[in-house]
Structures are given as structure tokens and as C-alpha cells.
Image (tube, helix red, strand yellow):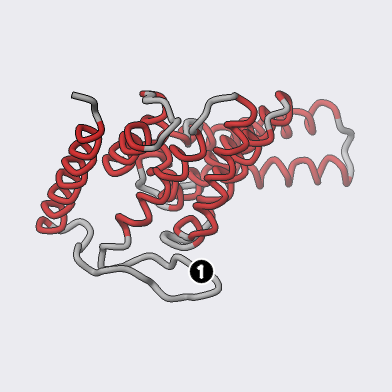
Amino acid sequence: MAIGLITGVAVAGLVPGVPFSPAGIALAGFSALAPDLDHPNSRLSKRLGFAQNYVRWAFVVVAAVVAAYAQWQLTPGPDRRLAFTVALAFGLVGAAMQGEATRKLALLFTGLCTVVAGLYTGFVWLSMLGCFIALAPFTSHRSYTHTIWAAAAWTYIGHLANQSLGWHGVALFAGGGYVSHLLADSVTKAGVKWFMPLVDTSLGIPLIRTGSKSGNMLEVVICAAYGVLVLALIISRLPF
């Protein structure tokens, strides 16, 4: 997120014609978190899966409703037995569902709600955003969301939002933030498969071991150096 926010400042302060916008900088930070929607412990994944704590209960409630309908509305026979079977299935799924499955379903629900909101308002970009949120959790970590194609799709969503909202620079803030995440991941030992599935090879410079003490310190140094560089470039362009 830090890399994305600094990139947002760079876009706002260095790209001609793009206004210096706190909202744009925040968008870049948000976009920098988007590739990790494929990871169960990512910050954005947890925040967008707002319904995660309720998904299991939703299955239980559906099971109870179907069972009640079968008991009081259906006569004994094949239809009633089928309804009770469906109720039992929903109940067992809800009872057995644990963290990762619940997270995926919650994000799927969040994404589908966003798609519906986009269709209702006529905003294509909002529906595309919903599709991204719904599908990303079902990919393995550092796979399809960590590719040049995903970055291009995210930037295009920003472009469509720019056209709909008339807010100049949305595509640059969104695309810059997203790409900054991929570049940051490219200096870790795992690297990034930028051109997957065409090229199933991780590319990058293996400088950081993610999660290690030395890796965390190096991340801070890189962010600080990047921030100082951006600030210096912005100051150099100010009239004195």
C-alpha cells in the first residue's frame, strides 16, 4: 500500500495535466492492494469480504427456510423429500464451511453485488470491477492477478471510470498503483509471472525474502528511498 500511495503522489505531482488529488492518491493505494485479492490474508481481501462472518449463517438460514417450506407447504412425496434433501445439504455446507471457503464466497457475493450495482447504474466499469473482485479469490496466489494482463484490465476499468465520472487521471492512478505492486513483488525471491499463461516463468530480481526480518527492513528502505526520490522530483519542478 505504501508503494501505491507514493506512486499516486508521483502521478499527481509529476504527470502534466493530472490534478494533485488526495482521492487519486488513495485510489493508487487501493489499486496497489488489488493484486493480492488472491491471497487469504491480504488486507483488501479481508475488507472487501464484508459478508464473510455471515456467509455460514446465510447457508443455515436458507436450510431452515427450505425445511420449513417443505414441512408446511408441500405434501408428502418426492418433492417434499427433495426439499428436505436440499435443506440438509445447505445446512451441512454452512456448518462445515471454514475460513478460506467463507472468504471466497464472501468476496464472490461482494463482487456480484458490485456487478448488479453497475448494471443498475449503467456504469460498465463498476460491473467490471465487480467481476474482478468476484473472480480474483478463486485464483492461486501470484498467478493471474499478478500479470500484465490483469494490470491492463485494471487500468482499462480506470479508463472507463474516467469517461463515466469525468475525473481526469483515474486510469493513471489505478494503473500506476497496480503496476507498482507487481514491480515491488518482482524484487522478492518468488518474483512475478508477468506474462502468465504465455510464459510460466517468474521474472524479477530476488532481493527480498518476504516475511523475513531482513526482508522487512529492506522493504522499508526501498519505500523510503522511493518516497525521497518522488519528493525530490516534485520539489525540483516547483517554481522558486
- Which residue lies under the disc numbered 1? 196
**Residue 122, image x and y in percent?**
73, 27
Residue drawn at x 66%, y 33% as measured from the top left = 62
- Bin the neighbour count of mark 1 within 10 Å (Cα to Cα): few under 14, some 14-19, many 20 and up: some
Residue drawn at x 50%, y 49% as measured from the top left = 101
**Residue 106, image x and y in percent?**
53, 39
Q: Taking 112 as reference, is 15 left or right?
A: left
Q: Taking 134 as reference, is 212 left or right?
A: left
Q: Name the image quarter holding the C terminus.
A: top left
Q: Name the image quarter holding the N terminus.
A: top left
Amino acid tagged 1: Met
Residue drawn at x 48%, y 36% as measured from the top left = 49
Tell me which corner region of the image, top left, top right, bottom left or bottom right, holds residue 201: bottom left
Query: Please, is residue 83 above or below residue 182 in the view?
Result: above
Q: Taking 179 as reference, is 96 left or right?
A: right
Outermost front residue:
240
Of 163 and 33, nearer the camera is 163
Residue drawn at x 53%, y 54% as measured from the top left = 150
Figure label count: 1
Q: SS class of the residue under badge 1? A: loop
Query: Please, is residue 77 above or below residue 196 in the view?
Result: above
Q: Taking 33 as reference, is 71 left or right?
A: right
**Residue 19, image x and y in percent?**
41, 25
Of 79 and 50, nearer the camera is 50
**Residue 145, image x and y in percent?**
48, 55
